[in-house]
Amino acid sequence: MFREGLPPMYIVIGFAAATLVVATLLLDKNLLAIILAVIIGIVLLLNQRQIKRDKSVLVKILLIGLLCIGVQRFGVPFLFTHVFEKHQVERIFSTIGRDIPEEYIKGEMKVDAKTGKQKIQPITM
């Protein structure tokens, strides 16, 4: 029996995007880019026969790989510097247990004397 609803590919893409964002926050930029490049290489090796028959498979794999690296390099930093508020960035990084990287800060970083935690002091004009 066929049920109407959301195709399962949307759920797979959503989980993959969420995993990519979390991995971007947890791992170093260059290390994650190398890991993604190795994964792309493995997928290319496993699909050699299909790529020989149809070159569009190669283009699709490379575009998906470039999209992942682009999200990792540019999308997540843009999201944290221009979309999220300062308190949201602080909360996300405190949840994963890491200090806020300097590239995600839109103000001056202050250390609270009482608690020793980092706080972002907004730049006032």
Image (tube, rainbow, N blue to C red):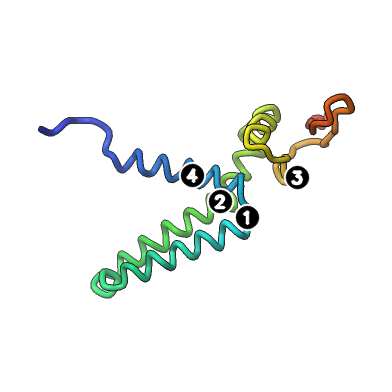
Q: Nearer the viewer, residue 17 or 99?
A: 99
Give x and y (percent) for residue 80: 63, 38
Type of the residue with mark 1: Lys
Give x and y (percent) for residue 34: 56, 63
Instruction: Measure the alpha-carbon separation of dots 3 and 2.
Output: 16 Å
Mark positioned earlier in the residue sequence (1 or 4)? 4
Query: In the rendered image, which residue does mark 3 sit on?
Result: 102
Disc 3 to disc 4: CB gap under 8 Å: no
Type of the residue with mark 3: Glu
Could you say whether the residue bearing mark 2 is in a helix, strand or loop? helix
Q: Is residue 120 left or right of residue 31?
A: right
Disc 3 to disc 2: CB gap under 8 Å: no
Mark positioned earlier in the residue sequence (2 or 1)? 1
Could you say whether the residue bearing mark 1 is in a helix, strand or loop? helix
Instruction: Measure the alpha-carbon separation of dots 3 and 4.
Output: 22 Å
Query: In the rendered image, which residue does mark 2 sit on?
Result: 72
Type of the residue with mark 2: Gln
Q: Residue furthest left?
A: 1
Q: Residue furthest bottom?
A: 52
Query: In the rendered image, which residue does mark 1 sit on?
Result: 29
Query: In the rendered image, which residue does mark 4 sit on?
Result: 19
